Image (cartoon, rainbow, N blue to C red):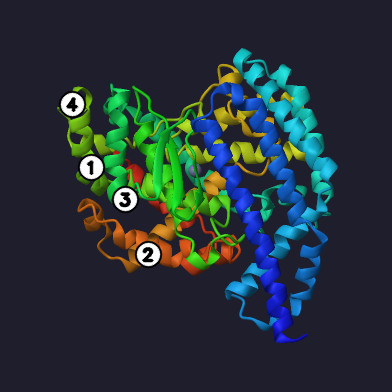
Amino acid sequence: VSASTNEQAFADLKERLSRLSDLGRIGRVLGWDQQVMMPPGGAAARAEQLGTLGRIAHEALIDDEVGRLLEQLSGYEESLPHDSFEASLIRVARRDYEKASRVPPALSADIARAASLGHQAWLEARAESDFARFMPALERNLELKHRYVECFEPAGEAYDVLLDDFEPEMTTGEVRQVFDRLKEELVPLIAAVRDSADAVDGALAQGPFPVERQPAAVVAILTPLGFDESSWRLDPTAHPFASGSGLTDIRITTRYLEDALMGVFAGIHEFGHGLYEHGSAPELDRTPLCGGVSLGLHESQSRLWENLVGRSRPFWRRFFAVLRDAFPEALGSADADGFYRAVNKMQPSLIRVEADEVTYNLHVILRFELEQELLADRIALADLPQEWNARMDEYLGIEVPDDAQGVLQDVHWSGGIFGYFPTYALGNVMSVQIWEALRRDLTDVDDQIEAGDFAPMREWLRERLHQHGRKFTPQETLERCAGSRIDPEPYLGYLRTKVADVYGVAA
Ligand code: ZN
């Protein structure tokens, strides 16, 4: 095969993939619009538009010509260095193509329809706190998941297939190993903190924070972090998220509450997601290599900014004045140190999205365990609420008063999304590995944070992590950035130190 033939085939493949990238980004703008701008009456038409776009993109990806080009290019790929742009593009496109080709379009359509019906059933069941009403939809979603798993003829556990959609190439066994270690350490740590919960006054973090003053305060905090209006937007939504249509069009949202600082912390969290998307190398633009490599690594970036930076002492030495000036009623007589402790108060609670840094992981582990047991038919669907409640008691020491605040609280299962939850806690674990590597290279990070100088951190993250996009597997990417594959020990050490600092409990 001549060099020019290879170059022509590669150019053809890249052109097809750039159109796919454009379709994906159009979908993101439609999705952003749906949550930020669209009147409710647009919902039915938007669902059709997104469905049509999804079908066009799927057909374009599994086109026979894509398969033919990938086959033709396999020798070319092998002749190139593993980390080159060309080899990476062919490798990742092949993976995407092979996964998408395995699922029959009729099954994809059934899954999408069941997800939509499941969402409606879940909304009604949650409103009435009635799990039985949700059961038939959940049963249908699970049945379709079994059929989905069968498309992949898994070599190991069935759950591996589901996990792979969100954390490519990580196995259930690897996750279990990390989570068992977290559980072993965190359950007793949480019990110890629970006994001294009153040592920290959380009232400072409960407002009142008049909602109309919050957007300006959030922008004042995000701007030195790297938010700039030439490439970013910030809008309010019911559920915060990060999106955008390109490397220099990053859209984040947050939610403003009068009695909590969710507006600030969700804003910083979504900024972390946005910065990751913003940082792909320009040559990856409009290819499948652009963007974050997995949900776990994405969450490592949002958590790094939200917790490791945004809930640190130097951060609030820098920014407490911004909030005190905006909210003198709540914060006028407080100081940065008391505020730091208030925003780090740890207390077992019912709702995952409101959980603190330590207890959050147990909410995730509980879901990871139940998902595997459901998939393996080890628990009956009707027993799911009891199983949930028993584990909440065992791990967090709290009683669940009703299913709305228990098994029905999250949207994921209603949409047939299984295998996603673990990535939240994997992100926490990886965030500290990355943070420690960053601190080895930049020795005066605390001073930089307190001085409001975030450029060295941003540059380090871009160079070591963000620029690679999807070129490598998530664990290869982590290894290049932090020097090792996933390891829970740095995270556990971080949590022990933080608890000791906030509570004065022995680490
Ligand atoms: Zn996130």
Callouts 1 and 3 close, C-beta under 8 Å:
no
Q: Is residue 216 visible?
A: yes
Mark 3 highlights which residue? Answer: 225
Q: Is residue 378 visible?
A: no
Q: Amino acid at mark 2?
A: Trp
Which secondary structure lies at badge 4? helix
Rendered position, 267 above or below 76:
above
Please state which amino acid type lies under the numbered disc 4: Pro
Is 66 positioned to the left or the right of 241 in the image?
Answer: right
Q: Nearer the viewer, residue 101 or 313?
A: 101
Residue type highlighted by circle 3: Leu
Give whichever of discs 1 and 2 has the lower sequence position: 1
**Type of residue at label 1?**
Phe
The residue at which mark 2 appears reads as 460
Reading the image, the residue beneath label 4 is: 328
Sequence-wise, the earlier of marks 1 and 4 is 1
Residue 26: percent from left, percent from top: 59, 46
Mark 1 — residue? 319
**How far from the left and from the top, in percent, is residue 495?**
40, 47
First of labels 4, 2 by sequence position:
4
